[in-house]
Structures are given as structure tokens and as C-alpha cells.
Amino acid sequence: MSAVSTAEAKAVNPRRRRIRRTEIWIYAFLLPTVVLYGLFTVYPIIGSYWYSLVDWNGFEAEKTFVGLANFAEVLSDPLFWNSFKITVIFTLVAVPVKVALALLLALLLNSRRLPFRNFFRVALFLPVVTTTAIVGVVMQFVFDPAGGPVNAALTKFGILDDGINFLGESRTALGTVIVVFVWKWLGTTLIYWLASLQTVPRELYEAASIDGASAWQTFRHLTVPLLKPFLIIITLLTVESTLQVFDLMLTMTHGGPFYATQVMEIYIYEAAFATGIPRLGLASAAAVLFGLFVCALGLLQLIGIRAARQMRSGQ
């Protein structure tokens, strides 16, 4: 071996050792996250598939294998299909309202002419960082039929003669929760839209203004075509977040009245913990079915993201 190659080898070896030490530290810092994720996410998912095949109350050590009996019972339960229907209705109403309202507010807050726009951004995002359970408890007071501020305002201005039990009547409970949910998580979708609007070059708006385009024409022929790829992604993200409404629904209505707001998560919770004898096997079967539905939506999200990328690349 020549003297030059020997010198290069000596220079490379310390460099490789430094790289290896860096990699070791990276894996060391990642290890707690991997362990916690495996214990509290991966293991419960795998365990739910096993529990869905057994009859177990969660207290006794003995578990009776029943095969697909839990799935058959869940699929034949009218309350399961009612919960599925409520979940779909909740999603179909909340998602368009949330996406459209957030887009409208983002267009307003993206304008440099709007005074105090940073203040309004913070105000609209503030409910997102508020604990959902606390929001649910507070909203019970807000919509209280006896002395709640909503009913007090409606009766004071002569809109209603008597207060309405918004959370205690089947015809109003779900709509009320949807309104609170949209208000609570509007800031997240608003951030998505604001980030999307930042990708539109200001020069295009200036050119449209010079050409005499109105605000509606600019929005229709300029903003909308450029935001179509983001619309797909934001809508799919909003759909997935809408399926996670357990804490808000539990604290506001507990799934009532008369199962009018019993979404899938409430159904699973009540099957597992709220009945006289807990049936973790039945609840796990319902959770597996609901998880498969969410996985289908995730697959749809991947397809939507791929379509959005193709649309972006074709522009």
C-alpha cells in the first residue's frame, strides 16, 4: 500500500467513526419514541384484533375464543348501524362547512388591507389549543335551556318565546355539536388554507388587478384553479379529524338524547365500559370495523395526495 493510500485510509476511518457515533446518538434519541409508540399505539391495535375474537369482560384472566361471533353480533346490532349513520352524517355536514368557512376566512385574513389580521388569526386559532373536554363542559352551560347565554339572547331579542334545550332534544343535539366542533377546530383548517394561499405568487394578483379583473373574477379564474390540489388534501385531512370527536361528544351529550349523537367512538366506549358487564370483545370488534373504515379513508387520502401532486406538476 502506498503512502498516499495509507494517509487517505487514516483520514477516512476517524470520519466513519464520527458518523457512526452520530448515528448511535440518533437511534438513542429515537428509541424512547419508538418504545412508547409501540406500547401505546402498535400493541393496542394488534391486541384489539385478538380481543375481537374472544369473549372477555376485562376482569377475569380467562378469555373464551368465539371466532367471528363478535363481528356477527356487531353487524346485526341496530345501534351499531345507527352510530355509523350518525358518524357519516356528522362528517358530511361538518367537513364542507368547516372547509368552506375556513377558506372564506383565510381569503380575508390573507389580505394585507385587513387591519389587525394577526389578532384575528390568533383569536380564531385559540379554540384549537383549548382542552376539548373543557370546551364540552362549558358548552353545556352555554346552551343550557334555563339560563344559558344563547337562550337568554334569543329570548331577549324576541326570536324565541321559550328556551330550547339544544343538547337535550334529538332534532337539535347533533347540529349543536357540529356547530361547536366547527368552531373548536376551525383554526386548524384555517392554517392549512393560509399556508396554501402563500404559494400563490403576488405577481399574479397584481397582473389581474392591472387587467381590470374584479375580486370575484380573480378568485374564480386565478385562486380556485391554483388551490384545487390543496383542496383535495385539506378536505381529506378534515375528514379524518372529524372522525375523532369522542371527547367533545362525550362531554356535551354522552351520545344522547336517544342515541341521536352516538357516533362510533361513543358506541365502542359504551360497549367496553359503560354497560353493566363490560364486553371488550364486542367493543374490539366494533373498533376493528371502524378502523377498517378509517383505513379506507386513509387509502383515499393517499390517492388524493397523488392526484394533487399530478395536478401541481401539470400546471
Image (tube, rainbow, N blue to C red):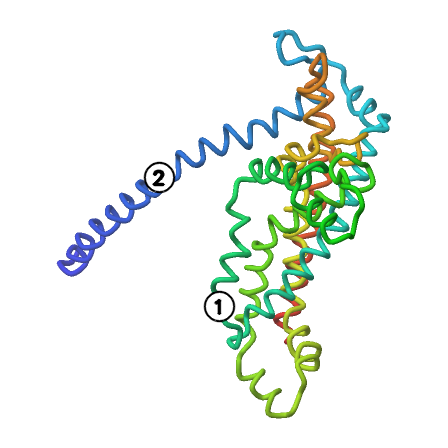
Which quarter of the rendering shows the C terminus? bottom right
Q: State the CA–CA distance, disc 1 to disc 2.
A: 42 Å
Quadrant assignment, res 107: bottom right
Q: Is residue 275 visible?
A: yes
Q: Is residue 298 visible?
A: no
- Secondary element at tag 2: helix
5 versus 80 height, above or below: below
Which quarter of the rendering shows the N terminus? bottom left
- Secondary element at tag 1: loop
Q: Amino acid at mark 1?
A: Phe
List x then y, in percent, for residue 128: 54, 48
List x then y, in percent, for residue 113: 52, 77
* Residue nearest the viewer, comparing 124 with 229: 124
> What residue is pinned by disc 1?
116
Label for residue 156?
Answer: none
Label 1 Cα neighbours within 10 Å, binned few <14 / some 14-19 / many ≥20: few
Mark 1 or 2 closer to N-term?
Answer: 2
Residue at point 71%, 12% (across, down): 277
Q: Amino acid at mark 2?
A: Phe
Quadrant assignment, res 35: top left
Asked if residue 1 lies left or right of residue 204, the reply is left
192 versus 174 height, above or below: below
> What residue is pinned by disc 2?
29
Choose mark 1 or mark 2, whichever is in front. Answer: 1
